[in-house]
Image (spheres, rainbow, N blue to C red):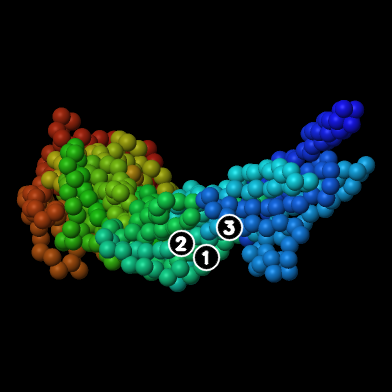
Amino acid sequence: MLLTLSGIGVLLGIFVFKKKYFQRFIVSPIYGPETSNDNDKVTFYCVAFNCPIATRVMWCVKESGEDTFKSSEPWSKDEEERLLGCGYTIRTDQFEDKGLHKVITALNFTPSVSIHINTTIVCRFTSDGKTKAEKIKWKFPLSKPQVSGEKPIALSLGDSGDVICSTNLKDFNPKDIVITWSCGAGHYQDLETINVKITKNSQQTYDAKSVCRIPGNRFNDPGFKVRVTWRHLSMEEAERKEASAADLPWRPQMSDISVPRLLLHGEEAKLQCTISGYFPGDLKVNWLRREAGKPDLFPVSPSDKYKLPVMDVTRQEDQTFTCTASLIYSVSRKTDHGSEFICQVGHPSLESPLEKRTGELDVEGILAVDVMLDDTQSDRWLIAEVRGFYPRDIKVRWSRTTLSMKGYEEYPESNITFEGQPNNNDGTFRLISKCKISKFNRANKKYKVSVSHKSLEPPIEKIISRPIGDKFLLEEDETPLPKLSSQGEKTLPPASPKPKGSAEKSEYLIDGEKEEKQPLCKFSSQKKPEPDEATETCDVSSEKEKEEEKSEET
């Protein structure tokens, strides 16, 4: 009886001891990296504490519920070779302390996307017939490519005028990626990729740059597009981006239209606009015209009035183009004053044309000054006919050489009269200015008429010399000054082949139309004009002129 009780006590003591002992057999969780890259080794480790005797360790790697790797230590030589061939290595270290064992084990391998896309890793410890296990779910990290830069496809110009297309994809994992190029207008053709570069970034993911080259003239077609496509394990479907001529950064830049400082009636004017910085070279330039006071625009075509020179196109160092568009036209006061010209530019990179405007044009007349002598009355007059000027404001000054013959002095207003004439059919103005001079001035006397106008720089000057007697000459060509006869007719210089013109009525052409030209002046030899007539005269000579007359008579 005592033996029986004694045996039961021993068994109970052993049971209590073993229960207490094995309760201290502890296994840690499996530790390892959360992410990894393709071809980068990873290490998972686990620790068992308070093992009563030497412990056996087993690692198991499962993919989609099936074992892809299973091994334990110690292993045979054949098993060791198999492990090395699969890229797995196991290392286990055991430490004994006060009759208990501490076991540290590590599993090391190089993950592959094709094998470890969705993996379960298990670590088992077996000690004295007892087994404890830990497991961890581990996925191979997939990162989708992201487009880098302001635009998916960056465009630049090569030295030969080709367009270099490039795309930058960043932050993708794993490393393997497929990037292809194609182009066309509706139907796409594959392009050769000239360069692909994949690099690892600071985030331990990958970046890629792919480049292709396209002839620049392909972008002359507004429907032409270039496409880049990429495929990656992280994507269910391929993604693509496109660029067309509208995405070209080399858009035309227009200068203001240069307009001559003076637009003179009857002369040609040249308008110019410089267009720069564009590519490709397919540029369309149109000139339009808006009539004064009207909103409608009309295209300008080559004609007798308009000339459109061929544009001078040059290629710059950056492979872009620069040209100058010109319009040459015959200026008419009647049709062009207040009108406006517009230069329009079209280019494949533009959704709508660019344009520059001249603003309303101010046409001015070209002055013509004719000088003649009226010696049919008791007084002697120099007459200047000024015609074809616009606007109306004009200044006419008469002067004569001083007594010392060292300069000119202006005639007083009392010696000068003006006659306004009807406007010309082309909208310009006419004016007659008369200056009364002495009949007794000495030889070598000179007279000068100066005409100042907005359209003139410098003023027009006509100098009349009196070398001897009653002979008057135009100094610029030393021709005799035309005279008015007693019948009011202008007597032409003897050297002129032209016949005498009628003082009552003559015709000349302006813009292809005939205009009747009234007599410049018509005087009576017996009667001076009255003050209320169109021509006002003054019979009072200046004191200096009287002194000159007296001196010459002496």
Crowd band around label 1 with a 10 angstrom C-alpha radius: few (<14), some (14–19), many (20+) = some
What amino acid type should be assigned to the residue bearing mark 1?
Answer: Val
Q: Which mark is residue 465?
A: none
Q: Which residue is mark 3?
A: 68
Crowd band around label 2 with a 10 angstrom C-alpha radius: few (<14), some (14–19), many (20+) = many
Disc 3 versus disc 2: nearer the observer:
3
Contact between marks 2 and 1 (CB within 8 A): the answer is yes
Disc 1 versus disc 3: nearer the observer:
3
- Find the distance from the CA under tag 1 to the CA under tag 3: 34 Å
Residue 548, compared with residue 88, is above or below; it is above
Q: Which residue is mark 2?
A: 179
174 on left or right of 319:
right
Q: Nearer the viewer, residue 452 or 163?
A: 163
Q: Which residue is mark 1?
A: 196
**At x 27% / y 42%, what residue is drawn?**
360
**Residue 29 quadrant:** top right
Residue 471, compared with residue 550, is above or below; it is below
Image location (x, y in percent) of residue 136: 63, 44
